[in-house]
Amino acid sequence: WREICLVLPPKLEVELLRDEVVEVAAQNVLGLPFRQTLRGEAARAFQHELDHLDGILIIDHAGLEDLPTDIQNLERPYHDARQRRAFARRIYQGETLYN
């Protein structure tokens, strides 16, 4: 899957893996819990936006050598740590978080 991000240069695309299906546990505006399964584009968009909440950009999913030189130079000091965060998976079973 190739992605772009509106906070990055417009022609920058990154090839990355996203789950095709995700199950989301959340609360509605009344605070009542619910679960919803997202598929396809909705699942990928949710993962992209969740990455933003965790301070992760699509460039963090890429290998440093796959990025344009100017972005490599900016990203190099931070890339390893940011990539580890990008690839960490939060998995919940019921109310329990498994890292």
Image (spheres, grey):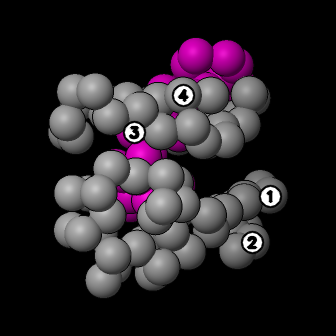
Query: Which of pointers 2 and 4 lies earlier in the amino acid sequence?
Result: 4
Give the quarter of the image for residue 35: top right
Residue annotated with mark 4? 2
The quadrant the N terminus occupies is: top right
Viewer-side label of 1, 4:
4
Residue annotated with mark 3? 49
Q: Where is residue 43 drawn, in percent x and y? A: 61, 26
- Region in magenta: 32-61
Q: Amino acid at mark 3?
A: Glu
Query: Cα distance, mark 1 to mark 4?
Result: 29 Å
Residue at (24, 69) in percent of width and height: 73
Query: Cα distance, mark 4 to mark 3?
Result: 15 Å
Q: Nearer the viewer, residue 74 or 87?
A: 74
Q: Secondary structure at mark 1?
A: strand
Q: Amino acid at mark 2?
A: Tyr
In the image: residue 48, left or right of residue 92? left
Q: Secondary structure at mark 3?
A: helix
Residue annotated with mark 1? 93
In the image: residue 41, left or right of residue 56? right
Q: Which mark is residue 98?
A: 2
Q: Which mark is residue 60?
A: none
Viewer-side label of 1, 2:
2
Q: Is residue 56 magenta?
A: yes
Instruction: Name, please, the residue furthest toward the front.
Output: 69
Q: Main SS type for the magenta part? A: helix
Residue at (33, 76) in percent of width and height: 76
Residue at (66, 23) in percent of width and height: 38
